[in-house]
Amino acid sequence: MALTKTTETTTKVPSRISGRVKVDERTKRLVQRLRRGDIALIHHADLDSVAARSLIDAGVSAVLNAARSITGRYPAYGARMLLDSKIPLIDELGDEFFNSIKEGDRVAIEGDAVLYGGGRQCKGNRVTVSDVDRQIETAKANVGAELEAFAKNTLNLLEQEWRPILEPLPLPEPLVHLARRHAVVVARGPGFKEDLAALRRYMQDSRPAIIAVDGAAQALLDIGIRPDLIVGDLDSVSDQALRCGARIWVHGYSQEDRPSPGMAVAEEKHLDALVVRSLGTSEDLAMLIAYELDCPLIVTVGCRFALEEFLDKGRSGMASTFLVRLKVGSRLVDAKGVGRLYSVRKQAREIVWLFLAALCPVAVALAFSPTGQFIVKLVRNWWRL
Protein backbone atom coordinates (compact mmCIF):
# COMPACT_ATOMS: atom_id res chain seq x y z
CA MET A 1 0.00 0.00 0.00
CA ALA A 2 1.29 3.44 -0.90
CA LEU A 3 -0.24 6.88 -0.46
CA THR A 4 0.77 9.44 -3.09
CA LYS A 5 -0.36 12.73 -4.63
CA THR A 6 -1.85 12.43 -8.11
CA THR A 7 -1.20 14.89 -10.92
CA GLU A 8 -3.08 15.91 -14.02
CA THR A 9 -1.22 13.23 -15.99
CA THR A 10 -2.78 10.35 -14.00
CA THR A 11 -3.62 7.58 -16.44
CA LYS A 12 -7.32 6.87 -16.74
CA VAL A 13 -8.51 3.28 -17.22
CA PRO A 14 -11.87 2.28 -18.71
CA SER A 15 -12.94 0.45 -15.55
CA ARG A 16 -13.26 3.62 -13.47
CA ILE A 17 -15.82 3.33 -10.67
CA SER A 18 -16.82 6.25 -8.50
CA GLY A 19 -19.26 6.72 -5.66
CA ARG A 20 -19.76 7.41 -1.99
CA VAL A 21 -18.10 5.23 0.62
CA LYS A 22 -19.69 3.54 3.61
CA VAL A 23 -17.06 2.44 6.12
CA ASP A 24 -16.98 0.22 9.21
CA GLU A 25 -14.45 -2.14 10.75
CA ARG A 26 -17.31 -4.59 11.43
CA THR A 27 -18.70 -5.83 8.12
CA LYS A 28 -21.94 -7.15 9.64
CA ARG A 29 -22.61 -3.69 11.09
CA LEU A 30 -21.74 -1.96 7.81
CA VAL A 31 -24.23 -3.91 5.68
CA GLN A 32 -27.15 -2.40 7.62
CA ARG A 33 -26.25 1.05 6.23
CA LEU A 34 -25.35 0.09 2.69
CA ARG A 35 -27.49 1.17 -0.25
CA ARG A 36 -27.35 -0.02 -3.85
CA GLY A 37 -24.41 1.58 -5.65
CA ASP A 38 -22.39 2.36 -2.50
CA ILE A 39 -18.70 1.51 -2.27
CA ALA A 40 -18.01 -0.56 0.86
CA LEU A 41 -14.79 -0.01 2.81
CA ILE A 42 -14.10 -2.89 5.20
CA HIS A 43 -11.26 -4.12 7.41
CA HIS A 44 -11.85 -7.85 7.14
CA ALA A 45 -9.05 -10.41 6.89
CA ASP A 46 -10.17 -13.73 5.39
CA LEU A 47 -13.49 -12.44 4.10
CA ASP A 48 -16.09 -15.11 4.87
CA SER A 49 -18.97 -16.25 2.70
CA VAL A 50 -21.71 -14.82 4.95
CA ALA A 51 -20.17 -11.33 4.92
CA ALA A 52 -19.64 -11.54 1.16
CA ARG A 53 -23.26 -12.59 0.60
CA SER A 54 -24.45 -9.62 2.68
CA LEU A 55 -22.34 -7.23 0.58
CA ILE A 56 -23.66 -8.77 -2.64
CA ASP A 57 -27.27 -8.56 -1.47
CA ALA A 58 -26.74 -4.89 -0.54
CA GLY A 59 -25.87 -4.15 -4.18
CA VAL A 60 -22.48 -2.50 -3.62
CA SER A 61 -20.62 -1.30 -6.71
CA ALA A 62 -17.19 -2.20 -5.30
CA VAL A 63 -15.48 -3.42 -2.13
CA LEU A 64 -12.32 -1.88 -0.67
CA ASN A 65 -10.55 -3.96 1.97
CA ALA A 66 -7.84 -2.54 4.21
CA ALA A 67 -6.81 -6.11 5.03
CA ARG A 68 -6.20 -9.22 2.90
CA SER A 69 -9.36 -11.02 1.83
CA ILE A 70 -7.42 -14.31 1.84
CA THR A 71 -4.44 -14.58 4.20
CA GLY A 72 -3.68 -18.21 3.37
CA ARG A 73 -4.48 -19.58 6.84
CA TYR A 74 -7.50 -21.48 5.52
CA PRO A 75 -9.73 -21.33 2.42
CA ALA A 76 -11.92 -18.21 2.72
CA TYR A 77 -14.37 -17.98 -0.16
CA GLY A 78 -15.78 -14.47 0.27
CA ALA A 79 -13.47 -12.86 -2.29
CA ARG A 80 -14.40 -15.45 -4.91
CA MET A 81 -18.10 -14.83 -4.30
CA LEU A 82 -17.66 -11.08 -4.87
CA LEU A 83 -15.77 -11.64 -8.13
CA ASP A 84 -18.33 -14.19 -9.32
CA SER A 85 -20.95 -11.47 -8.77
CA LYS A 86 -18.88 -9.01 -10.89
CA ILE A 87 -18.06 -6.81 -7.88
CA PRO A 88 -14.52 -5.34 -8.03
CA LEU A 89 -12.36 -5.99 -4.95
CA ILE A 90 -9.30 -3.95 -4.00
CA ASP A 91 -7.25 -5.56 -1.22
CA GLU A 92 -4.50 -4.52 1.21
CA LEU A 93 -5.21 -0.78 1.22
CA GLY A 94 -3.88 -0.53 4.77
CA ASP A 95 -4.76 1.12 8.07
CA GLU A 96 -3.65 4.61 7.04
CA PHE A 97 -6.11 4.68 4.16
CA PHE A 98 -8.88 3.10 6.25
CA ASN A 99 -8.50 5.71 8.99
CA SER A 100 -8.38 8.61 6.54
CA ILE A 101 -11.74 7.84 4.90
CA LYS A 102 -14.94 9.16 6.45
CA GLU A 103 -18.49 7.95 5.92
CA GLY A 104 -19.93 9.55 2.78
CA ASP A 105 -16.59 10.53 1.18
CA ARG A 106 -16.46 10.28 -2.59
CA VAL A 107 -13.78 8.05 -4.10
CA ALA A 108 -12.89 6.77 -7.54
CA ILE A 109 -11.34 3.42 -8.41
CA GLU A 110 -8.95 3.23 -11.36
CA GLY A 111 -7.27 -0.13 -11.78
CA ASP A 112 -5.61 -0.96 -8.47
CA ALA A 113 -5.66 2.67 -7.25
CA VAL A 114 -8.24 4.50 -5.16
CA LEU A 115 -8.43 8.28 -5.70
CA TYR A 116 -9.81 10.34 -2.84
CA GLY A 117 -9.52 13.52 -0.81
CA GLY A 118 -8.78 16.12 -3.48
CA GLY A 119 -6.05 14.34 -5.39
CA ARG A 120 -4.68 11.74 -3.00
CA GLN A 121 -4.17 8.20 -4.19
CA CYS A 122 -3.83 4.84 -2.46
CA LYS A 123 -2.66 1.76 -4.32
CA GLY A 124 -3.79 -1.67 -3.28
CA ASN A 125 -4.11 -5.06 -4.93
CA ARG A 126 -6.89 -5.47 -7.48
CA VAL A 127 -7.96 -9.04 -6.84
CA THR A 128 -8.53 -11.33 -9.83
CA VAL A 129 -10.13 -14.76 -10.10
CA SER A 130 -6.76 -16.37 -10.83
CA ASP A 131 -5.31 -14.70 -7.70
CA VAL A 132 -8.13 -16.05 -5.56
CA ASP A 133 -7.97 -19.58 -6.97
CA ARG A 134 -4.22 -19.73 -6.41
CA GLN A 135 -4.52 -18.43 -2.84
CA ILE A 136 -7.33 -20.88 -2.04
CA GLU A 137 -5.17 -23.81 -3.21
CA THR A 138 -2.32 -22.56 -1.01
CA ALA A 139 -4.71 -22.19 1.92
CA LYS A 140 -5.98 -25.75 1.48
CA ALA A 141 -2.42 -26.96 1.95
CA ASN A 142 -2.14 -24.95 5.19
CA VAL A 143 -5.45 -25.99 6.73
CA GLY A 144 -3.90 -29.02 8.46
CA ALA A 145 -1.76 -26.80 10.68
CA GLU A 146 -4.79 -24.63 11.46
CA LEU A 147 -6.81 -27.71 12.39
CA GLU A 148 -4.10 -28.90 14.78
CA ALA A 149 -3.92 -25.51 16.53
CA PHE A 150 -7.72 -25.31 16.62
CA ALA A 151 -8.05 -28.78 18.16
CA LYS A 152 -5.42 -28.08 20.83
CA ASN A 153 -7.10 -24.83 21.80
CA THR A 154 -10.49 -26.54 21.93
CA LEU A 155 -9.15 -29.17 24.34
CA ASN A 156 -7.65 -26.47 26.57
CA LEU A 157 -10.94 -24.55 26.61
CA LEU A 158 -12.91 -27.70 27.44
CA GLU A 159 -11.18 -27.88 30.81
CA GLN A 160 -12.23 -24.29 31.59
CA GLU A 161 -15.75 -24.19 30.15
CA TRP A 162 -17.36 -27.58 30.74
CA ARG A 163 -18.83 -26.91 34.19
CA PRO A 164 -20.69 -23.60 33.58
CA ILE A 165 -22.11 -24.80 30.26
CA LEU A 166 -23.32 -28.20 31.48
CA GLU A 167 -24.97 -26.65 34.55
CA PRO A 168 -28.56 -25.28 34.23
CA LEU A 169 -28.73 -21.85 32.57
CA PRO A 170 -30.60 -19.24 34.66
CA LEU A 171 -33.17 -17.51 32.44
CA PRO A 172 -34.04 -13.85 33.14
CA GLU A 173 -37.78 -14.53 32.63
CA PRO A 174 -39.83 -17.72 32.19
CA LEU A 175 -41.25 -17.24 28.63
CA VAL A 176 -44.05 -19.69 29.37
CA HIS A 177 -45.63 -19.13 25.94
CA LEU A 178 -42.51 -20.59 24.26
CA ALA A 179 -41.92 -23.50 26.65
CA ARG A 180 -42.34 -27.10 25.46
CA ARG A 181 -42.85 -26.05 21.83
CA HIS A 182 -40.63 -26.98 18.92
CA ALA A 183 -37.92 -24.33 18.50
CA VAL A 184 -36.09 -23.01 15.44
CA VAL A 185 -32.76 -21.29 16.13
CA VAL A 186 -31.76 -19.06 13.20
CA ALA A 187 -28.26 -17.63 12.69
CA ARG A 188 -26.69 -15.97 9.67
CA GLY A 189 -24.48 -18.90 8.71
CA PRO A 190 -23.71 -20.14 5.18
CA GLY A 191 -26.84 -21.07 3.23
CA PHE A 192 -29.24 -19.98 5.98
CA LYS A 193 -31.67 -18.28 3.57
CA GLU A 194 -32.03 -21.44 1.48
CA ASP A 195 -32.56 -23.50 4.64
CA LEU A 196 -35.24 -21.07 5.83
CA ALA A 197 -37.06 -21.40 2.52
CA ALA A 198 -37.02 -25.20 2.86
CA LEU A 199 -38.48 -24.92 6.38
CA ARG A 200 -41.46 -22.71 5.57
CA ARG A 201 -43.90 -25.64 5.40
CA TYR A 202 -42.61 -27.08 8.68
CA MET A 203 -42.94 -23.70 10.42
CA GLN A 204 -46.49 -23.27 9.13
CA ASP A 205 -47.49 -26.73 10.36
CA SER A 206 -45.66 -26.86 13.71
CA ARG A 207 -45.77 -23.19 14.78
CA PRO A 208 -42.38 -23.45 16.54
CA ALA A 209 -40.80 -20.84 18.79
CA ILE A 210 -38.48 -18.75 16.60
CA ILE A 211 -35.20 -17.67 18.22
CA ALA A 212 -33.11 -15.31 16.07
CA VAL A 213 -29.41 -14.74 16.66
CA ASP A 214 -28.54 -11.08 16.03
CA GLY A 215 -28.84 -10.13 12.33
CA ALA A 216 -30.87 -13.23 11.47
CA ALA A 217 -33.90 -11.38 12.89
CA GLN A 218 -34.01 -9.07 9.87
CA ALA A 219 -33.67 -11.99 7.46
CA LEU A 220 -36.73 -13.57 9.09
CA LEU A 221 -38.73 -10.35 8.81
CA ASP A 222 -37.77 -10.09 5.14
CA ILE A 223 -39.64 -13.34 4.44
CA GLY A 224 -42.61 -12.45 6.62
CA ILE A 225 -41.66 -14.32 9.82
CA ARG A 226 -41.47 -12.46 13.13
CA PRO A 227 -39.06 -13.96 15.67
CA ASP A 228 -40.32 -14.61 19.18
CA LEU A 229 -36.93 -13.95 20.78
CA ILE A 230 -33.79 -12.11 19.62
CA VAL A 231 -30.53 -13.16 21.28
CA GLY A 232 -27.06 -11.64 20.87
CA ASP A 233 -24.96 -8.55 21.38
CA LEU A 234 -27.27 -6.52 19.07
CA ASP A 235 -24.39 -5.12 17.00
CA SER A 236 -25.90 -6.32 13.71
CA VAL A 237 -29.64 -6.13 14.46
CA SER A 238 -31.62 -3.58 12.44
CA ASP A 239 -33.88 -1.04 14.12
CA GLN A 240 -36.86 -2.65 12.40
CA ALA A 241 -36.02 -6.02 13.96
CA LEU A 242 -35.39 -4.52 17.40
CA ARG A 243 -38.86 -2.97 17.34
CA CYS A 244 -40.77 -5.86 15.73
CA GLY A 245 -42.28 -7.00 19.05
CA ALA A 246 -39.88 -9.85 19.80
CA ARG A 247 -38.44 -10.27 23.28
CA ILE A 248 -34.80 -9.16 23.41
CA TRP A 249 -32.20 -10.97 25.49
CA VAL A 250 -28.68 -9.56 25.40
CA HIS A 251 -25.81 -12.05 25.51
CA GLY A 252 -23.67 -10.95 28.44
CA TYR A 253 -20.27 -12.06 29.64
CA SER A 254 -20.31 -14.86 32.20
CA GLN A 255 -18.53 -12.58 34.70
CA GLU A 256 -21.08 -10.50 36.59
CA ASP A 257 -18.77 -7.49 36.87
CA ARG A 258 -18.25 -7.14 33.10
CA PRO A 259 -20.76 -4.85 31.38
CA SER A 260 -22.51 -6.19 28.30
CA PRO A 261 -21.95 -4.18 25.09
CA GLY A 262 -25.42 -5.19 23.94
CA MET A 263 -27.06 -3.47 26.90
CA ALA A 264 -25.42 -0.20 25.87
CA VAL A 265 -27.14 -0.57 22.48
CA ALA A 266 -30.46 -1.41 24.16
CA GLU A 267 -30.26 1.58 26.50
CA GLU A 268 -29.29 3.93 23.68
CA LYS A 269 -32.34 2.82 21.68
CA HIS A 270 -34.63 2.73 24.77
CA LEU A 271 -35.39 -0.97 24.34
CA ASP A 272 -36.87 -3.32 26.93
CA ALA A 273 -34.05 -5.87 27.06
CA LEU A 274 -32.75 -8.38 29.60
CA VAL A 275 -29.27 -9.82 30.06
CA VAL A 276 -28.55 -13.55 30.05
CA ARG A 277 -24.96 -14.46 30.92
CA SER A 278 -23.24 -17.44 29.35
CA LEU A 279 -19.96 -18.62 27.86
CA GLY A 280 -19.70 -19.39 24.16
CA THR A 281 -21.25 -17.86 21.09
CA SER A 282 -24.71 -16.35 20.80
CA GLU A 283 -25.68 -19.40 18.73
CA ASP A 284 -24.68 -21.62 21.65
CA LEU A 285 -26.73 -19.45 23.99
CA ALA A 286 -29.81 -19.66 21.76
CA MET A 287 -29.64 -23.48 21.80
CA LEU A 288 -29.23 -23.50 25.59
CA ILE A 289 -32.28 -21.24 25.97
CA ALA A 290 -34.38 -23.61 23.85
CA TYR A 291 -33.09 -26.51 25.97
CA GLU A 292 -33.98 -24.77 29.25
CA LEU A 293 -37.44 -24.00 27.84
CA ASP A 294 -37.85 -27.79 27.51
CA CYS A 295 -38.37 -27.62 23.74
CA PRO A 296 -38.66 -31.24 22.53
CA LEU A 297 -37.12 -30.46 19.11
CA ILE A 298 -34.53 -27.77 18.34
CA VAL A 299 -34.01 -27.09 14.63
CA THR A 300 -30.87 -25.12 13.76
CA VAL A 301 -30.61 -22.86 10.72
CA GLY A 302 -27.24 -21.38 9.74
CA CYS A 303 -25.53 -22.47 12.97
CA ARG A 304 -21.83 -23.20 12.55
CA PHE A 305 -20.11 -26.47 13.35
CA ALA A 306 -17.48 -26.98 10.62
CA LEU A 307 -13.85 -25.92 11.13
CA GLU A 308 -13.87 -23.40 8.28
CA GLU A 309 -17.07 -21.81 9.58
CA PHE A 310 -15.46 -21.22 12.98
CA LEU A 311 -12.28 -19.85 11.43
CA ASP A 312 -14.46 -17.59 9.27
CA LYS A 313 -15.76 -16.02 12.48
CA GLY A 314 -12.28 -15.64 13.97
CA ARG A 315 -12.84 -18.36 16.58
CA SER A 316 -9.71 -20.15 17.81
CA GLY A 317 -11.66 -23.03 19.39
CA MET A 318 -15.10 -24.58 19.64
CA ALA A 319 -15.26 -25.97 23.17
CA SER A 320 -18.52 -24.24 24.05
CA THR A 321 -20.26 -25.36 20.86
CA PHE A 322 -19.10 -28.95 21.37
CA LEU A 323 -20.37 -28.96 24.96
CA VAL A 324 -23.70 -27.34 24.07
CA ARG A 325 -24.41 -29.89 21.35
CA LEU A 326 -23.39 -32.66 23.74
CA LYS A 327 -25.84 -31.30 26.33
CA VAL A 328 -28.75 -30.73 23.95
CA GLY A 329 -28.18 -34.16 22.41
CA SER A 330 -30.97 -35.86 20.48
CA ARG A 331 -33.24 -32.80 20.55
CA LEU A 332 -30.99 -31.06 18.03
CA VAL A 333 -31.80 -31.39 14.32
CA ASP A 334 -30.25 -29.53 11.39
CA ALA A 335 -32.64 -27.62 9.14
CA LYS A 336 -31.57 -29.57 6.06
CA GLY A 337 -32.86 -32.82 7.55
CA VAL A 338 -36.25 -31.33 8.45
CA GLY A 339 -36.48 -29.64 5.04
CA ARG A 340 -35.87 -32.93 3.21
CA LEU A 341 -38.46 -34.72 5.36
CA TYR A 342 -41.12 -32.13 4.55
CA SER A 343 -40.13 -32.19 0.88
CA VAL A 344 -40.80 -35.95 0.79
CA ARG A 345 -44.16 -35.47 2.58
CA LYS A 346 -45.10 -32.74 0.12
CA GLN A 347 -44.26 -35.00 -2.85
CA ALA A 348 -46.35 -37.81 -1.33
CA ARG A 349 -49.34 -35.46 -0.90
CA GLU A 350 -48.99 -34.28 -4.48
CA ILE A 351 -49.00 -37.89 -5.75
CA VAL A 352 -52.17 -38.68 -3.75
CA TRP A 353 -53.97 -35.60 -5.09
CA LEU A 354 -52.83 -36.42 -8.64
CA PHE A 355 -54.21 -39.96 -8.25
CA LEU A 356 -57.54 -38.66 -6.92
CA ALA A 357 -57.75 -36.12 -9.74
CA ALA A 358 -57.19 -38.89 -12.28
CA LEU A 359 -59.98 -40.96 -10.69
CA CYS A 360 -62.56 -38.16 -10.96
CA PRO A 361 -63.35 -38.45 -14.71
CA VAL A 362 -63.40 -42.25 -14.41
CA ALA A 363 -65.90 -42.04 -11.53
CA VAL A 364 -68.12 -39.58 -13.43
CA ALA A 365 -68.12 -41.74 -16.56
CA LEU A 366 -68.91 -44.84 -14.52
CA ALA A 367 -71.76 -43.12 -12.68
CA PHE A 368 -73.60 -42.35 -15.94
CA SER A 369 -73.07 -45.77 -17.53
CA PRO A 370 -75.70 -48.57 -17.20
CA THR A 371 -73.29 -50.59 -15.06
CA GLY A 372 -72.63 -47.62 -12.84
CA GLN A 373 -76.34 -46.89 -12.37
CA PHE A 374 -76.94 -50.54 -11.47
CA ILE A 375 -74.20 -50.36 -8.81
CA VAL A 376 -75.71 -47.14 -7.42
CA LYS A 377 -79.12 -48.86 -7.10
CA LEU A 378 -77.56 -51.81 -5.29
CA VAL A 379 -75.79 -49.51 -2.83
CA ARG A 380 -78.97 -47.50 -2.25
CA ASN A 381 -81.03 -50.65 -1.55
CA TRP A 382 -78.33 -52.00 0.77
CA TRP A 383 -78.28 -48.71 2.67
CA ARG A 384 -82.06 -48.81 3.20
CA LEU A 385 -81.77 -52.25 4.73
Image (cartoon, helix red, strand yellow):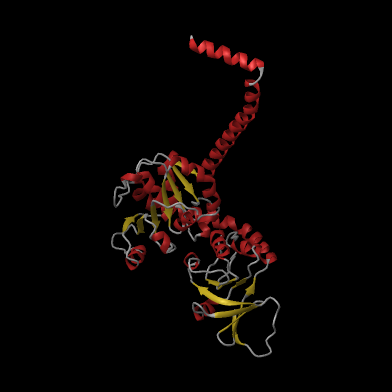
Considering every residue shown, the one lying at the far bottom of the view is 8
Front residue of this view, candidates 29 and 166: 29
Q: Is residue 263 left or right of residue 137?
A: left
Judge left or right: residue 220 versus residue 77: left
Residue 103 at x, y = what percent? 49, 77
| Residue sitting at x 63%, y 74% | 125
Viewer-closest of 290 and 146: 290
Q: Could you say where residue 316 lies in the image, as x and y percent from the top left?
A: 48, 58
**With respect to residue 188, does 178 lie above or below?**
above
Task: Say how many tags the image has.
Answer: 0
In terms of depth relative to the viewer, which is nearer, 149 or 104?
Answer: 104
* Residue 352 drawn above or below residue 76: above
Q: Nearer the viewer, residue 353 or 22?
A: 353
Give the residue drawn at x 65%, y 65%: 83
Q: Quadrant of the N terminus?
A: bottom right
Q: Please tell me whether residue 370 is drawn above or below residue 321 in the rendered image.
A: above
Kindly identify the residue that appears in the image at 55 percent across and 85 percent down: 117
Q: Position of residue 228 (x, y in %)?
A: 39, 51
- Residue at the limit of the structure toward the top, as seen here: 385
Residue at 32 percent of width and 48 percent of height: 175
Q: Position of residue 339 (x, y in %)?
A: 54, 42
Occupied quadrant, residue 264:
bottom left
Residue 232 in the image: above or below residue 177: below
